[in-house]
Image (spheres, helix red, strand yellow):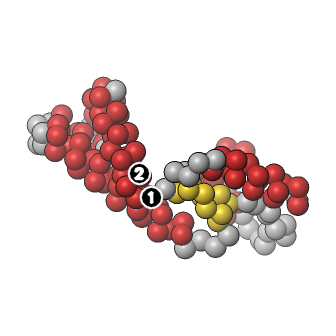
Amino acid sequence: RLVRAIEIAIKGVPLSRKRGPLNKQVNSLWLGLTAPTTLIDQRINHRVIHRAQHGMTSEVKRLTHQYPDWSLPAFSATGYREWHDYLNSTTTKSQAINLWQTAERQYARRQVTWFKKMPGITWFDVSRPNYHNQVVQTVKTWYNQI
């Protein structure tokens, strides 16, 4: 989605919708960041708690006031529906946080599954020391070859 948005902002139309073959092969380097599942889960749980404590209530209240129709696709993002239910007293704060954390962890697993199927991604484990240096070296090597 981000790539498509950038293409639209720059060219006015995404490359995938242009007519005719693309004659130029794009040389790109795909890097993936990964970590043990326990670390990913821990980071997700902390991030959800941080967001819950720092602005989610005001954000959801503002959006509810601005857009009363919660069937819009934008509200399908994880966290919004769970927090909306909490603010409407459908769930407790603890339940909302737990549901939100679960949804985020499930989404992260779907992302990993999706990207693991893509060939050509060079993966780096962020839990390993000096992974930054490995990423920099990989990019430098790739860049010097183009």
Distance from label 2 to label 1 (Cα)?
Answer: 5 Å
- Can residue 8 be seen here? The reply is no
Question: At 78% from the left edge and 72% from the top edge, which residue is drawn?
Answer: 21
Q: Quadrant of residue 125?
A: bottom right
Q: Residues within 10 Å of mark 1 (few under 14, many from 20)?
A: few
- On the rendered image, what quadrant is the N terminus found in? bottom right
Q: Which residue is mark 1?
A: 36
Give the image location of residue 136, x and y in percent. Answer: 73, 48
Q: Relative to the observer, which residue lies in front, 24 or 29?
A: 29
- On the rendered image, what quadrant is the C terminus found in? bottom right
Tell me the SS state at disc 2: helix
Is residue 119 shown left or right of residue 63?
A: right
Q: Relative to the observer, which residue lies in front, 142 or 20?
A: 142
Q: Quadrant of residue 69?
A: top left
- Give me the disc on residue 39: 2
Q: Relative to the observer, which residue lies in front, 77 or 46?
A: 46
Tell me the SS state at disc 1: loop
- Can residue 130 be seen here? The reply is yes
Question: At 16% from the left edge and 44% from the top edge, which residue is drawn?
Answer: 95
Q: Residues within 10 Å of mark 2 (few under 14, many from 20)?
A: few
Determine contact: label 2, label 1, CB under 8 Å: yes
Give the image location of residue 31, x and y in percent. Answer: 65, 58
Question: At 42% from the left edge and 64% from the top edge, which residue is drawn?
Answer: 110
Give the image location of residue 77, x and y in percent. Answer: 37, 48
Is residue 56 shown left or right of residue 29?
A: left
Give the image location of residue 137, x and y in percent. Answer: 76, 52
Question: At 82% from the left edge and 68% from the top edge, which residue is drawn?
Answer: 25
- Give me the disc on residue 60: none
- Type of amino acid under label 2: Leu
Is residue 146 shown left or right of residue 51?
A: right
- Type of amino acid under label 1: Pro
